[in-house]
Image: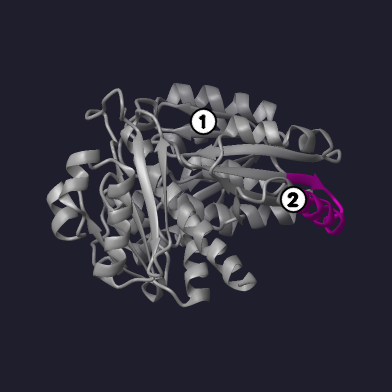
Amino acid sequence: MNAIIITIGDEILIGQIMDTNSVFIASVLTENGITVIEKNTVSDNPAEIEEQIPRAMLRAGLVIITGGLGPTSDDRTKSTLCKIFNTMLVENSDVLEDVKGFVARRSGVLNDLNRKQAAVPACATVLRNPIGTAPGLWMEKDGSILIALPGVPFEMEHLMVNEVLPRLKSQFKLPEITKVTVLTTGISEARLAELLSGFEQQLPQGLSLAYLPSPGIIRLRLLYIGLEKDQQQDMVNAQVEKLKGLIPEYIFGFNDDTLQQVVGRLLVRRNETVSAAESCTGGAISSLLTSVAGSSRYYTGSIIAYDNTVKIEQLKVDRALIQQYGAVSKPVAEQMAAGCCKVLGTGWAVATTGIAGPDGGSPEKPVGTVWIAVAHKSGLIQSARFSFGEHRGRNIQRASVAALNMLRTLILQKETDEFYN
């Protein structure tokens, strides 16, 4: 089955908000064997909506639209759908009860605009929305299905997972999907593709490899679409094992793992703790660490040593080292990490000092230069210099990822050393 996704809203077209809805819908459809052949965004202009939807329904058996289902004057999708399907809006008693309950739970008073949400095209099957006031709509015409969903992301996601997908699965025999995502870091996309060129060439027919990059991390998605689920899983697992043999030093997890979760599991396994001394990352590493539920088992705290005075007074960095080498240097990064271990009493500490930009660079230390150090209470310490580029936000993201990955690799190295010693 082919699908087309249409997002509706002037706010998306003018760049006021990002279109995350089509990304979510496309991922859900793809993971269930439905091929997305097109994604479009149209304005709230009824003429544009009226033109785009029939065109899409001629091209695809499934069209999903989001947006324009609200009660305000700029929400014109429902009335336009009535024109396309030659029907009229009627008040749906189930939706009205849902809206009344939703408003009451928020201690509100039902008004005419709220009640307007209960008006739906007469030919539509209602997809009830327990977490909002706009219901989803399922409509069929000439062998094509049109599904209209609210534009509010969490409402759309709820309906997509709990209403749309189960109905599609019950009405159609969708192909089986097997997908494994291999998570890598510490290597560029071009270099990774070079290392895996031979691997890609020998992939079995029907199995595809996609590179999905983000700052500091590249996700390798292995995807197979077919009908024999057990055979698919064995085939994909065999390719994953090959990847483990080809690029073991760059793989840190699989599927929904995050680097901070992986680090957390390693620390829990060793019953150790970690802290952070952050300069250029400004707390980003700490934010990642504490984003994991249960991180209080191993994360104790951080020192945001943005100013040199904090490095000297709180982390006990030697003032002479800063004067001689500068704050962005190997010895300062290492003293920040070692000092953090001692001051906060943790087993491990990560430290960052760098030039995030856009200003502050020099020929010797251009914008994007970052020194990262990881220290252990035993005296083990490692540091490395990175050059991340000129974009401040990406520099902070990439430095945070690199710091966590350096911590991960050192923990694993220490475990190996202890095993063999």
Q: Position of residue 413 (x, y in %)?
A: 56, 61
Magenta stretch: residue 171 in it? Answer: no
Residue at image mark 1: 83
Amino acid under disc 1: Lys
Magenta-drawn segment: 223-242
Rendered image quadrant of residue 161: bottom right
Q: Nearer the viewer, residue 84 or 399?
A: 399
Rendered image quadrant of residue 62: top right
Q: Position of residue 308 (x, y in %)?
A: 16, 47
Instruction: Tell me which label, 2 or 1, sits earlier in the chain.
Output: 1
Rendered image quadrant of residue 392: top left
**Which secondary structure lies at badge 2?**
helix
Q: Nearer the viewer, residue 181 or 342?
A: 342
Q: CA distance from mark 2 to mark 1?
A: 59 Å
Residue at image mark 2: 245
Disc 1 crowd, CA 10 A, few/some/many (<14, 14-19, 20+): few
Q: Nearer the viewer, residue 58 or 344?
A: 344
Amino acid under disc 2: Gly
Disc 2 crowd, CA 10 A, few/some/many (<14, 14-19, 20+): few
> Of the numbered discs in the image, which one, if any, rests on residue 225?
none
Q: Position of residue 189 (x, y in %)?
A: 58, 33
User: From the image, which quarter does the C terminus lie in?
Assistant: bottom right
